[in-house]
Image: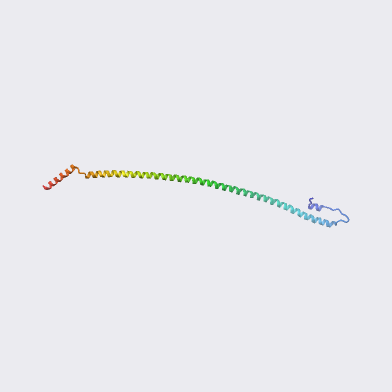
Amino acid sequence: MNLSKIDLLNKKFSRTAFGYAPKEVDLLLVEVAEVLGEAADRQRELARKAKRLEAQLQEYMQRDETLRDTLMSTQRMVDELKVAAGREAEIILGEANAKAREIVQRGHERLAQLHEEIESMKRQRNQFKIQLKGLVQAHLELLESSDPQQSRLEELESKVSFLKKAE
């Protein structure tokens, strides 16, 4: 049974010869009505406050869930970024290694080419040296060889010089 303050104030008791004193009953009823009214007001206020707190709790729970979802999606994004960055680093590292191998290979090829050129130049130098020695030797032999006509000519010239001096 749900009694309100107004129900208690409007309640009338029947009177009997040996019953309760009506003034005391009325005073008690007023007092009980006040207490019940205050309790009902307090209950309504607490119910409103409970609804407000439940709404806040719902809001906080939604915020908490949103934060949790955000943290989870952020963590997933961070993990995905780490994986992507790792893949990209591997690709960059692979490309750098390939370029380095290519540069080293070209360096080896150029070194081999330079060695060939050096050997070719050494061969050319040796051939030139041999040819020059041969040419110098031939000229030296020409210079040192006594040509019989030249010797005869020199001998005649020396006699002509002697005769000129004798005159």
- Image location of residue 59, percent across then percent down: 66, 50
- Residue for point 81% across, 56% down: 28
How many numbered markers are drawn? 0
In this picture, residue 153 sits left or right of residue 45 = left
- Image location of residue 45, percent across then percent down: 73, 53
- Image location of residue 138, percent across then percent down: 25, 43
Residue 154 occupies quadrant: top left
- Residue for point 47% across, 46% down: 97
> Which residue reaches farthest top?
149
In this picture, residue 25 sits left or right of residue 67 = right
- Residue for point 31% across, 44% down: 126
- Residue for point 41% across, 45% down: 108
Q: Nearer the viewer, residue 5 or 90?
A: 90
In this picture, residue 105 sits left or right of residue 67 = left
Q: Nearer the viewer, residue 158 or 69?
A: 158
- Image location of residue 48, percent across then percent down: 71, 51
